[in-house]
């Protein structure tokens, strides 16, 4: 299933790339995109602008009910959490005092070589950083974790499945572009596709290392090839797979939500009812269930 998904996304990349440069290979077009990124001292500012644009679009298109008008604090990632490129630090479901949420952006480490710092920044290319901001904040993790506060049982608040948490955030990256965010610009679609392939590359290397015994370096080479990544960020992503081998749940969760959305649409239309993407999103987030169980609620037998 993963190999088929990778092939499908690669074909999509090739089609989109021809609209930017019909004479260049898709890999070269992707390389051009990743070489354009904000300076390190502009990452937080650029991410803040991205979040505001995304929020305006969500409200304009009525894509999901936002539980609050507040936005998280956007800051450089604290030293203790720098193993990831970006993250969302949100209050726990029972927190009533420290209620501020933080969108963390990992700046280049000054101890890295100049090449490593530059390759790290390729992850934050302009369409890539936009996708990160959708994923982490609007309407991704931040919105989903606000809904967690309102879930009907303590059990659901504590034991939220990773395929829902990460699947939802990853799903929103594609959903926003599908709904017209960015006006259909090919560069934004390619940024979204690159991040989708990043998650399928995680699927591949997690299995390759832990099931087939592939080395970290060989897996990193394959990761870079699948996701159009520079060597250093591909290695960092692959290293994550050594202690988080099932980080395939990003791609799996996105695929499950997309499938459920289409089946739910058909279910409603068969009953003569109108599908609303906002109602679908609100219900998915309000239940806090694994997608398989949410399916049983939305489409009862």
Image (cartoon, grey):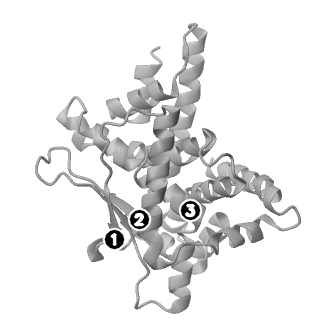
User: Most extreme residue toward the left, as rendered?
Assistant: 97
Q: Earlier along the polypeptide chain: callout 1 or callout 2?
A: 1
Distance between the Cα atoms at labels 1 and 3? 17 Å
Local SS, label 3? helix
Mark 1 secondary-structure assignment? loop
Along the viewing direction, whichever of 102 and 171 lies nearer the viewer: 102
Residue behind mark 1: 77
Residue 33 as seen in the image, left or right of residue 181 = right
Q: In the rendered structure, are the residues bearing label 3 and label 2 in contact, judged by CB atoms less than 8 Å apart?
A: no
Residue 105 lies in quadrant: bottom left
Q: Name the residue nearer the viewer: 131 or 256.
A: 131
Residue 8 spot, x, y in % from top left: 72, 49
The residue located at (69%, 52%) in the rendering is 185
Count neighbours of disc 3 (C-alpha within 10 A) and say few if under 14, some if 14 to 19, many if 20 or more. Answer: many
Q: Is residue 254 above or below residue 119?
A: above
Which of the labelled discs sits on residue 128, or is there none?
3
What percent of the width, then of the height, locates residue 214?
56, 72
């Amino acid at each position: 299933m993963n190999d088929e998904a990778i092939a499908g996304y690669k074909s999509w990349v090739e089609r989109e790339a021809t609209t930017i440069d019909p004479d260049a290979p898709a890999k070269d077009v992707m390389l051009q995109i990743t070489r354009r990124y904000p300076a390190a001292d502009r990452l937080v500012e650029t991410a803040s602008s991205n979040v505001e644009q995304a929020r305006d679009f969500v409200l304009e298109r009525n894509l999901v009910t936002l539980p609050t008008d507040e936005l998280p604090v956007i800051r450089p990632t604290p030293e203790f959490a720098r193993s990831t490129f970006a993250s969302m630090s949100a209050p726990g479901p029972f927190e009533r005092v420290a209620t501020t949420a933080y969108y963390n952006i990992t700046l280049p480490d000054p101890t890295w070589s100049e090449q490593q710092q530059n390759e790290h920044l390729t992850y934050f290319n302009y369409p890539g950083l936009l996708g990160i901001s959708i994923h982490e904040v609007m309407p991704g993790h931040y919105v989903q974790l606000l809904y967690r506060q309102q879930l009907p049982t303590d059990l659901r608040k504590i034991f939220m499945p990773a395929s829902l948490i990460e699947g939802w955030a990853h799903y929103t990256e594609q959903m926003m572009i599908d709904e017209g965010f960015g006006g259909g610009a090919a560069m934004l679609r390619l940024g979204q596709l690159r991040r989708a392939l990043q998650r399928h590359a995680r699927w591949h290397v997690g299995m390759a290392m832990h099931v087939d015994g592939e080395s970290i370096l060989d897996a990193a080479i394959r990761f870079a090839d699948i996701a159009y990544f520079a060597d250093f960020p591909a290695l960092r992503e692959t290293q994550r797979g050594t202690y988080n081998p099932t980080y395939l749940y990003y791609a799996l969760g996105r695929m499950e939500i997309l499938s459920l959305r289409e089946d739910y649409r058909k279910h409603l239309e068969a009953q003569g009812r109108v599908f609303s993407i906002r109602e679908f999103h609100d219900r998915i987030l309000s239940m806090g269930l694994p997608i398989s169980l949410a399916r049983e609620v939305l489409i009862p037998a």
